[in-house]
Structure formats: C-alpha cells, structure tokens
Amino acid sequence: MTDISPEEAARHRAKMEKRKAVQDAEVAEKTVEKGLLIVHTGPGKGKSTAAFGLALRTLGQPDGAKVGVVQFIKGAWESGERTALESFGARVEWHSMGEGFTWETQDLARDIASARRAWDKAREMLDDPAFGLVILDELNIALRYDYLPLPEVVAALSARRDGLHVVVTGRNAKAELIEAADLVTEMGLIKHHFKAGVKAQKGIEF
C-alpha cells in the first residue's frame, strides 16, 4: 500500500470536496424528466448490446413497465439476449421481423415489405402506454437503404408519447434522426476480432 502523508490526504479531501460541490450543483440544475429518443450508431461493435443493457435497467424498475423490441434486419435467429429478456415473461415483447441483410435476400421489394411490417409493429408499441422502452434494432439500416420514408419515421419518433424511451440502433444514422434525438452515441471501431479471422461466437455476437 502506498504511504500517503497527512498533507497529501488533506489536499485530496479538499479537492474532492470542491468537485463534489460542483457536481451536486450541476445535478440540482437538472429538473426535466422526459422520454428520450436515443440513437446508437457508428462502425464499432456494441450498439445493440448497449440497447439491451437499457432493457435490463427498465426491467429492474418496480413500475412494471414493458420492454418492446423490433428487429428490422435480423431474422428469427436464436440469441442469448432474446432468451434472457424473454425470461421476464409478459414484460418483454420481441419481434424479429427482418429476413437478413440486403445482400442475403437480394430482393428489394421483399426487403421494403419486411421493413414496413416491422415499422407497423413498432408504431403499435409506440402507441401502447404499457411500454416504457422500445428498442428499434437496426432501424438505421432500413433508413439507410430507403426501405422506409425518413420523414414519416422521424415525425413519429419525435411525436412519441410522454415518458416513453426509444432506442434506435444501426450504422449510418441519418442526420435528420440525429437532429431529432436527445442522446446520440457513436461507437468507434479501433480493433475487431473478425479481422483476425475469429468467427461469431456465443455470448459475444449472439
């Protein structure tokens, strides 16, 4: 253990007291409580993973609010997060409505129809007061490829009911969606194991 002199300890305590006073004052200034539109974008891994972390936070609250998940691109594959979240029973509603990425389906009309069905389901959740959090997984991809009309989507998300939190994930978030959002996080890519030939693995990618 590093020896700390009484003088060093006193200086540290005084510094932390000042920092705490600043932090407490800043927190006290925040008085708005509202449902947030949150966007997770960028080339790095972790966009959906972070969204599902928020799902767990919501489910950990005693108010009984439901979590809704609509996956716009990913198909009905088995994933650890889906299995875990669905163990909460009726408090989680999950719809995987995609049919895979566009290079897999190779059918534009089919991709557009799939995105429209997913968006219709998302609209149902947005209007249902039982939901406290709605995750629109890979919606950014559907918007990037113009599978859905961007103005319609941004307008609906901006007009969400009070108290509802919505998370939109996927690379290449549109500027209009970023402008409408309350919180935007860009996941940066520094290093990825795929580049070293490591395949998708249980507990990491699904």
Image: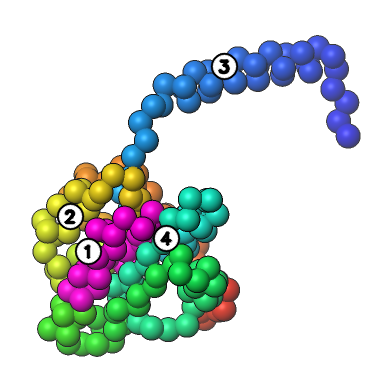
Does residue 51 lie above or below 34 as drawn?
A: below
Pointer 1 local density, CA inside 10 Å: few below 14, some 14–19, many at least 20: some
Q: Which mark is residue 66?
A: 4
Confirm or deny contact between disc 4 and disc 2 (CB under 8 A).
no
Q: Which residue is mark 3?
A: 21
N-terminal label among 3 and 1:
3
Q: Secondary structure at mark 4?
A: strand
Side of 23 where 109 appears, left or right: left
Q: Which residue is mark 2?
A: 156
N-terminal label among 1 and 4:
4
Q: Amino acid at mark 1?
A: Arg
Residue range highlighted in magenta: 116-139
The CA distance from mark 3 to mark 2 is: 40 Å
Q: Is residue 128 magenta?
A: yes
Where is residue 39 shown, x and y percent of the image?
Answer: 33, 53
Pointer 2 local density, CA inside 10 Å: few below 14, some 14–19, many at least 20: few
* Observer-nearest of 197 and 187: 187
Q: Residue at x 68, y 13 (%)?
A: 14
Pointer 4 local density, CA inside 10 Å: few below 14, some 14–19, many at least 20: many
Confirm or deny contact between disc 2 and disc 1 (CB under 8 A).
yes
